[in-house]
Amino acid sequence: MKHTIKGDTITVYLSGELDHHSAESVRQELEGLISSPRVKNLVLDLSRLSFMDSSGIGVVLGRYKTLAKRGGTVAVREPTAHVNRIFSMSGLYQIVEKL
Amino acid sequence: MSKINEMRIDFMALPENEAFARVAVGAFMLPLNPTLEEMEDVKTAVSEAVTNAIIHGYENKGGMIRLSAELDEGGVIKMEIIDCGVGIEDVERAREPLYTSLPEMERSGMGFTVMESFMDSVTVLSRPGHGTTVRMEKKLGA
């Protein structure tokens, strides 16, 4: 998974489709990337994520819980119109900032 | 309203078939000239229903899922996702936003809410021990 780290913030670039099938591996990879206590904030670049359903909501919520315990945050940037609607509809934007 | 096309596919309740079901419905509905947004709405709703059948209906133990769809003249797509799994004891509760029987699996409990938001109507018929049928309808160009 493509990612960049700057200070205590990691930016991860998601691509392809995030459904129940891919959710488990995405979850594990993201958990691995944020496992270092140095990482406090996660930014998900969604510009290349072409599909997401409610399984993706669970993945984002789970990472939010991990980082919130450390006083960190989760943010997203450049969601496609479709992914943006799933985020809005689910209320995720109440805890996840759109940059 | 007269029917212009109809299809039926049976496939195994495997996670890799979630994408297959989405693509199949997407291709089938093309004659209705859907907008990109309408196409995504329908594909997402199918994805939610098929995922439910796999993890809740069949509890990840496998089985067969039937996806049937119909296009009507007025630009309406009707679909059914049918499993012969464990069924849902309390359909009303299952449809509540954020309700999930599997919180430890990071399920968001938003599946039915997504289906209801993206489709015009969602009907759930379920009998414990016999399976679940999700019937959905959407008028395109509305």
Image (cartoon, grey):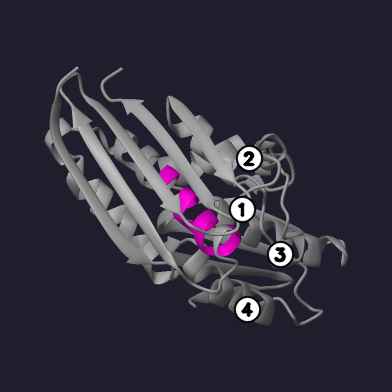
The residue where tag 2 is placed is: A90
Based on the displayed image, in which of its 4 quarters is residue A63 positioned?
Answer: bottom right
In front of the other: B17 or A79: B17
Q: Using a 10 Å C-alpha cutoff, classify the residue at mark 2 as few (fewer than 14 neighbours), some (14 to 19) or many (20 or more).
A: some
Q: CA distance from mark 2 to mark 1?
A: 8 Å
Q: CA distance from mark 4 to mark 3?
A: 10 Å
Mark 4 lies on a secondary structure that is helix
Q: CA distance from mark 2 to mark 4?
A: 22 Å
In terms of sequence position, does the residue under pointer 4 or pointer 3 come before the other?
4
> Which quadrant is home to the C terminus of chain B?
top left
Based on the displayed image, in which of its 4 quarters is residue A24 positioned?
Answer: bottom right
Foreground mark, 3 or 1, reads 1
The residue where tag 4 is placed is: A28
Report in which chain the residue with disc 1 lies.
A
Q: Amino acid at mark 3?
A: Arg
Q: CA distance from mark 2 to mark 3?
A: 16 Å
Q: Using a 10 Å C-alpha cutoff, classify the residue at mark 3 as few (fewer than 14 neighbours), some (14 to 19) or many (20 or more).
A: some
Image-based side of B48 in relation to B66, left or right: right
In front of the other: B102 or B7: B7
Same chain for labels 4 and 3? Say yes or no.
Answer: yes
Q: Give the residue displayed 42% in from the left and 50% down from the top.
A: B82
Same chain for labels 1 and 4? Say yes or no.
Answer: yes
Percent position (x, y) of residue B80? 37, 42
Mark 1 lies on a secondary structure that is helix
Report in which chain the residue with disc 3 lies.
A
**Rendered image: mark on residue A83:** none
Q: Amino acid at mark 2?
A: Ser
The relative height of residue B95 versus residue A61 in the rendered view (above or below) is: above
Q: CA distance from mark 1 to mark 4?
A: 15 Å
Q: Main secondary structure of the magenta part?
A: helix
Asked if residue A54 is among those painted magenta in the image, a careful observer would answer no
**Rendered image: mark on residue A63:** 3
